[in-house]
Image (cartoon, rainbow, N blue to C red):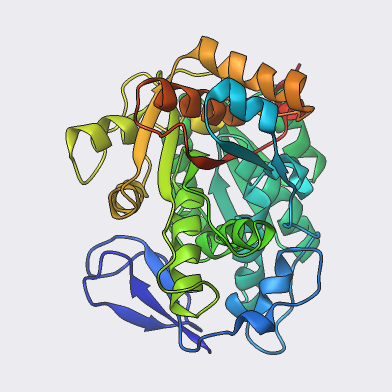
Amino acid sequence: MSWTLHCSTGCGYTAPGDKLASLCPKCAQPLAVHFDHQPARSSIGTETSLWRYASALPLAKGETRVTLGEGMTPLLELPHVAREVGVRRLWVKDEGQNPTASFKARGLMMAITRAKALGLPGVCVPTAGNAGIALAAYAAAGGMPARIYAPRTTPPPILGSIRAYGVELELVDGHIGDAGKATMQFAKETGFFNLATVREPYRVEGMKTMGYEVAEQLGWELPDAIVYPTGGGEGTIGIWKAIGEMIEWGWLPSEVVRPRMIVAQASGCAPLVRAFHAGDDKATPWENPETHASGLRVPGPFGDRWTLRTLRESHGDAEAVDEAAIRAGTFTLASRAGIDAAPEGGCALAATAQLVQTGRLSRDASVVVFNTGSGASYRW
């Protein structure tokens, strides 16, 4: 194996990359992949998918990729929207163009690829929506049994998409935390592997490719800020990991100024925003989470410590916006840019505008805003 697993907290635990792993056995925190080689930028392939970065992904020689052509989504510069928001330059990275219509395709592709390589009997996951669709699709593509647990309040189009792939879907009362408890119990009883956010080390590896793509699509430069709508945290974590790797490996100059990582959440469920502004190193679960942006309805993200550390290392920020602002941001992306954005993308755009208005984001900034999914998944 060309990688090892290290505890994300720096507690000192390491493990070989060819062993099945979940959380750190010393401190019960997420594990992270560390490569034992430094792939050169010249190793980037010609594929029009994230697999152009295969040299920087945890895939051993001879192992099979489980892929649907994910990644290399459009990075669209929107000068007119930049003027409305109040920044110098603004791009939207449209993850709704992925297979399964969200950024979750990246992480679940990598998790299923590793699950196949490790010979696991089956996989399971709790979902607020898009992760369920992605797991269902990639489990089908990889020929693996899968069980998905989702809140009953998940948008019906998302539940319909999950069922269409032929996996087992169980609906639970409550929120994704309740789905998570049911998933853990099922995994314990059956031996299926739990692929919940950051409870295994490989979803982040798929997510980090968003960071590689932003840099490459900007001509190997970085924006001043990246605004990411965040529920569980793996997208924010992954992008920051990619930036560090690109600098370490010489893909970017050592003196490059890293972007500020900014988390956008709904005011009805903003545990990371609350923890960040309180100066806490972990988030207290949100009471009675409510937002129509179901991907943000994650009251107790397990990746909270890693995400908060990312924000502070990057001199970043965290902003919560109300439901009206989310809807307005979503409509702006559709009506002013032709992007069929999920409400999470609308949240990120609205958060960007609020940060400019309050002086926490410079009007001279260049900003990449992520739309993490397709609006079609939310309409019924």
State the residue lying farthest toward the left: 279
Horizontal and vertical percent position of residue 67: 77, 64
What residue is at 27 percent from the left and 29 percent from the top?
274
State the residue lying farthest toward the top: 324
Residue in front for this viewpoint, 279 or 214? 214
What residue is at 37 percent from the left and 82 percent from the top?
15
Q: Quadrant of the C terminus?
A: top right
What residue is at 43 percent from the left and 68 percent from the top?
244
Horizontal and vertical percent position of residue 262: 42, 40
- Would residue 266 be visible to someone looking at this image? no
What residue is at 57 percent from the left and 60 percent from the top?
221
Residue in front for this viewpoint, 341 or 80? 80
Classify 336 as above or below 282. Answer: above
Classify 255 as above or below 298. Answer: below
Horizontal and vertical percent position of residue 133: 70, 43
Classify 66 as above or below 332. Answer: below
Q: Is residue 276 left or right of residue 77?
A: left
- Would residue 179 be visible to someone looking at this image? yes
Residue in front for this viewpoint, 272 or 336? 336
Q: In this view, does 98 lie to the left or right of 244?
A: right
Residue in front for this viewpoint, 83 or 322? 83
Count of number-bearing discs: 0
Horizontal and vertical percent position of residue 207: 57, 57
Residue 345 location, quadrant: top right
Q: In this view, does 200 lie to the left or right of 206?
A: left
Classify 23 as above or below 164. Answer: below
Residue 155 location, quadrant: top right
